[in-house]
Amino acid sequence: MQHLITAATDLFPYVPLVAGIYLFWTGLRAWIRGSRQTGESGNRLLGMMRGFRVGIIGLALAGVGLWLLTGQTWILVVALGVGGEELLESSFIIATIRADPRLREKAN
């Protein structure tokens, strides 16, 4: 039983790192898909920003995993600081696209 607990604690730092890389890859693919959409620019921009937001969340999560592996506090501060700021910015842009009457019908 002790070996199982030790193995789980040894693998724990890799979980957010791998999950973050997966989310970044998913966001990058969504960003590319959004940029290739045809038609209205509201749909294209909304798809790109949604992919960007998922990618940023993935990079921040990967930064937390890297912090768990290395123990360097500055990595955590940079990952959460940049990730939080970009998440706030991209959420504001998405809300603005949805609220704009010229783009509302096109983006939803």
Image (cartoon, helix red, strand yellow):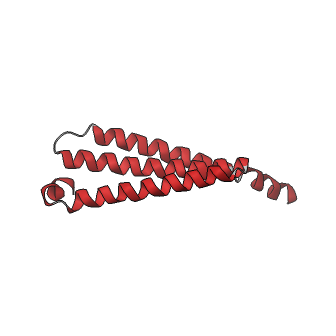
| Residue at far right of view | 2
Q: Who's the residue at 60% across and 46% down the image?
A: 18
Side of 91 relative to 77 (left or right):
left
| Residue at far left of view | 102
Q: Who's the residue at 54% across and 44% down the image?
A: 21
x and y, in percent, of residue 57 in the image: 48, 53
Residue 16 seen anywhere in this rendered image of the structure: no
Side of 106 relative to 5 (left or right):
left
Quadrant where the C terminus is found in the figure: bottom left
x and y, in percent, of residue 44 in the image: 24, 44
x and y, in percent, of residue 65 in the image: 64, 50
Residue 14 seen anywhere in this rendered image of the structure: yes
Where 37 sits versus 57, above or below? above
- Taking depth in this image into account, of 78 and 41 the one nearest to the observer is 78
x and y, in percent, of residue 103 in the image: 16, 55
- Taking depth in this image into account, of 70 and 39 the one nearest to the observer is 70
Q: Who's the residue at 24% across and 40% down the image?
A: 37
